[in-house]
């Protein structure tokens, strides 16, 4: 049974994570009745659904849910706050919400959530670990388990579309049997997409406030502006994330500050190539920003000659050159950078499972780069 001290701790927004952890556990009828009088569970979409499940299990009246489901099927989270990280479909919580809706009898809404959730999967049907997720955030096993439980609850088969589009969050992607290209125009300290072939490639990329490796200044922040989307092209304007010590109430979710930079992006995607043109707006201090890529592969080649391997102390610092990851993916930055640095990583769960951090020092605008699969 919940103690009065525990209940008192749920009276602030920054204890939502603790409340969610409590609602995921079996509760007795008296504890559920005590929670009913606290407003906090109404402030988060998943907390609403989990509390309703607790009421159903305890034989209490089930409260009506107040959820806004997009036409695409996604249910944005944190819609009630004015936070930079609001109104995004964070994949693990989104999958949990869909499963809870199914258990509550909202079958049509749950089915739409499951359909949309397939946008977050790669060509193997596995979660794209970096999509909407910050470095050091939700673990891959937890995300995979949440997806599996959602699809099992809804009875959804993993039939994946070749083309991914979503105008609410700015998603554009292409899948083949062996590859996934996905670009995303929204997030919070998360990246701009992936470029994957089999189990390697670029697992994340985006702008980075220096120093390199400090992911508190990595990525984009918020929903896109001036979004234009077709089956092959994506253009948008979004803010560049910045460090911020303000607490969110979630250990896996860090707030973003104001960097002073906006990113204007134009992309074209085909089944075997991504072409990108981007410009930084709002400041001329390019020496404060890098363009970083997180790569996965058994080796990284600079200009097809200099070889780097994961988990080694050998690194590259020098002129910007074309890069090859393993024997699958090439990265070529044609304009906007003169120097680059490649740092081998541990290849563990950090940095979205990447083996290499590749950072380009920007010297001019616009920046043009291409990613391609090797023939």
Image (spheres, rainbow, N blue to C red):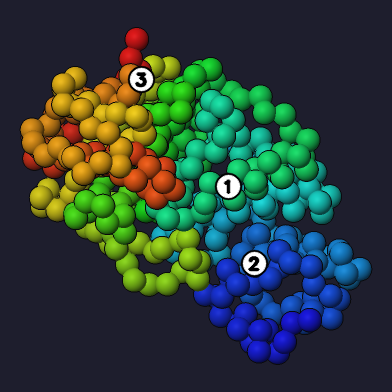
Residue 336 showing in the rendered view: yes
Local crowd size for mark 1, using a 10 Å CA cut-off: few (<14), some (14–19), many (≥20) = few
Which secondary structure lies at badge 1?
Answer: helix
Gap in angstroms between the C-alphas marked 3 and 2: 41 Å
Secondary structure of residue under mark 2: helix
Q: Earlier in the sequence, mark 3 or mark 2?
A: 2
For marks 3 and 2, give the one nearer the viewer: 3
Q: Is residue 293 left or right of residue 24?
A: left
Q: Secondary structure at mark 3?
A: loop
Name which quarter of the figure residue 18 lies in.
bottom right
Mark 2 packing: few (<14 Cα in 10 Å), some, or many (20+)?
some
Position of 20 with respect to 367 (left or right) is right
Depth check: 5 or 71 in front?
A: 5
Note whether 146 is above or below 329 in the view shown: below
Above-or-below relation of 79 to 319: below
Residue neighbourhood size for the residue with mark 3, other residues' Cα within 10 Å, grouped as few (<14), some (14–19), many (≥20) = some
Quadrant containing the C terminus in the rendered view: top left
Pointer 3 residue: 328
Q: CA distance from mark 1 to mark 2?
A: 19 Å
Nearer to us in this view, 179 or 37: 179
* Residue tagged 1: 141
Residue 82, percent across and down? 46, 65
| Image mark for residue 20 | 2
């Amino acid at each position: 049974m919940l103690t009065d001290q525990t209940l008192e701790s749920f009276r602030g927004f920054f204890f939502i994570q603790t409340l969610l952890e409590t609602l995921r556990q079996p509760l007795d009828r008296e504890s559920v009745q005590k929670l009913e009088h606290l407003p906090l569970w109404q402030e988060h979409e998943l907390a609403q659904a989990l509390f309703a499940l607790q009421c159903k299990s305890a034989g209490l009246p089930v409260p009506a849910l107040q959820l806004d489901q997009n036409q695409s099927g996604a249910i944005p989270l944190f819609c009630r706050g004015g936070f930079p990280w609001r109104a995004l479909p964070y994949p693990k919580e989104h999958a949990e919400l869909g499963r809870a809706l199914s258990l509550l009898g909202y079958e049509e809404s749950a089915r739409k959530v499951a359909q949309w959730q397939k946008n977050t999967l790669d060509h193997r049907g596995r979660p794209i670990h970096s999509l909407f997720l910050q470095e050091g955030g939700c673990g891959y096993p937890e995300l995979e388990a949440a997806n599996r439980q959602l699809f099992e609850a809804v009875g959804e088969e993993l039939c994946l579309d070749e083309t991914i589009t979503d105008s609410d969050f700015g998603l554009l992607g292409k899948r083949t049997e062996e590859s996934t290209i996905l670009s995303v125009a929204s997030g919070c300290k998360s990246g701009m997409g992936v470029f994957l072939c089999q189990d390697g490639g670029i697992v994340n990329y985006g702008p980075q406030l220096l120093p390199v490796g400090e992911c508190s200044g990595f990525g984009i922040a918020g929903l896109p502006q001036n979004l234009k989307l077709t089956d092959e092209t994506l253009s948008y304007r979004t803010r560049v994330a910045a460090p911020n010590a303000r607490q969110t109430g979630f250990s896996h979710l860090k707030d973003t500050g104001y960097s002073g930079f906006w990113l204007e992006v134009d992309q074209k995607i085909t089944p075997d190539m991504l072409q990108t043109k981007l410009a930084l707006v709002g400041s001329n201090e390019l020496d404060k920003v890098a363009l970083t890529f997180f790569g996965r592969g058994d080796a990284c080649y600079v200009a097809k000659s200099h070889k780097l391997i994961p988990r080694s102390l050998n690194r590259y610092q020098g002129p910007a050159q074309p890069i090859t990851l393993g024997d699958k993916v090439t990265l070529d930055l044609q304009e906007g950078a003169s120097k680059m640095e490649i740092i081998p990583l541990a290849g563990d769960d950090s940095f979205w499972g990447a083996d290499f951090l590749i950072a380009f020092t920007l010297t001019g605008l616009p920046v043009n780069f291409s990613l391609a699969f090797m023939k």
